[in-house]
Image (cartoon, grey):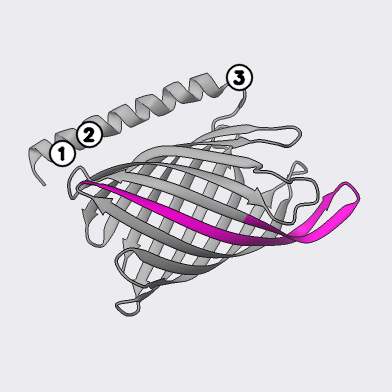
């Protein structure tokens, strides 16, 4: 890695942290505690087309003093060609409630993604259908599952081999929710990947998640860091 690349990386990292701090200050009127996300992903190549993955994520709340939620995600991915990928995943979640009890949830989801690149810019459109299983009471209705269509568009700029800034937008559209009939959640994020080598990369980002078309709407702001390993 050249000195020029290192200097650019350090400058970009400093700008990202400064932006995250400014956004957090602006968000204090809506969110009174600082939140943060940490994730680790491991991927194993099975064949030229198939790979298996394991992902763990922790969301910390109350100025990073309380674990708000945690999940383990296992999946298998199939690469049809350089543009199209399919994925099938199972996720086990522990979600902290207002009674300070961790409530277990389970999720199954299927993805299909299409990626197209032009020079240094690439875009990925991901479609997802997910079904969550957990005891849930909304009004007088008890559900055992909620199904959502959850799609995301990600745009990346490949500055060089090491540094890849990105932005993305995502929405949640309920399919069988008893009270939500429209898009009820939006998320935007900006950040970058830093690729150390073919087996390890890190992701740093800042996300804003906004609830819409529902009562008691909330907006959550959180920086996150994820480490990716290929074995």
Circle 2 residue:
10
Return the disc, 1 or 3, that comes first in the chain's sequence: 1
191 is higher (above) or lower (below) than 122: above
Q: Nearer the viewer, mark 2 or mark 3?
A: 3
Residue 192: percent from the left, percent from the top?
32, 42
Among the 4 quarters of the image, the one containing residue 166: top left
Residue 35: percent from the left, percent from the top?
54, 35
Residue 142: percent from the left, percent from the top?
85, 57
Residue 32: percent from the left, percent from the top?
61, 25
The image's mark for residue 6 is 1
Q: Nearer the viewer, residue 16 or 97?
A: 16
Q: Residues within 10 Å of mark 1 (few under 14, many from 20)?
A: few
125 vs 49, left or right, is right
Circle 3 residue:
29
Alpha carbons under labels 1 and 2: distance apart? 6 Å
Q: Residues within 10 Å of mark 3 (few under 14, many from 20)?
A: few
SS under mark 1: helix
Q: Residue at x 73, y 37 (%)?
A: 214
Q: Residue at x 51, y 19 (%)?
A: 26
SS under mark 3: loop
Among the 4 quarters of the image, the one containing residue 86: bottom left
Q: Is residue 135 magenta?
A: yes
The image's mark for residue 40 is none
Q: Residue at x 30, y 27 (%)?
A: 15
Return the disc, 2 or 3, that comes first in the chain's sequence: 2
Q: Is residue 16 magenta?
A: no
Check if mark 1's residue and mark 2's residue have beta carbons within 8 Å: yes
175 vs 200, left or right, is right
- Magenta region, residue range: 120-148
Alpha carbons under labels 2 and 3: distance apart? 31 Å
Alpha carbons under labels 1 and 3: distance apart? 36 Å
Q: Nearer the viewer, residue 12 or 100?
A: 12
């Amino acid at each position: 890695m050249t000195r020029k690349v290192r200097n650019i990386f350090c400058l970009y990292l400093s700008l990202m942290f400064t932006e995250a701090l400014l956004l957090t200050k602006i968000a204090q009127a809506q969110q009174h505690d600082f939140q943060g996300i940490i994730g680790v992903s491991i991927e194993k190549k099975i064949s030229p087309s198939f790979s298996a993955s394991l992902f763990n994520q922790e969301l910390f709340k109350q100025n990073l003093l309380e674990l708000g939620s945690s999940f383990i995600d296992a999946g298998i991915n199939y690469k049809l060609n350089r543009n199209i990928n399919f994925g099938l995943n199972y996720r086990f979640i522990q979600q902290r409630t207002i009674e300070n009890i961790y409530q277990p949830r389970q999720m199954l989801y299927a993805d299909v993604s299409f990626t197209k690149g032009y020079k240094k810019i690439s875009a990925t459109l991901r479609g997802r259908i997910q079904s969550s299983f957990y005891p849930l009471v909304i009004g007088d209705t008890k559900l055992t599952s909620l199904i959502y269509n959850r799609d995301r568009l990600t745009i990346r700029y490949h500055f060089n081999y090491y540094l890849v800034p990105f932005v993305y937008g995502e929405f949640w559209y309920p399919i069988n929710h008893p009270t939500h009939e429209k898009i009820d959640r939006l998320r935007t994020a900006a950040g970058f990947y830093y690729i150390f080598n073919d087996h390890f990369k890190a992701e740093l980002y800042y996300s804003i998640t906004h609830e819409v078309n529902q009562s008691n709407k909330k907006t959550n702001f959180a920086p996150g860091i994820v480490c990716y390993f290929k074995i």
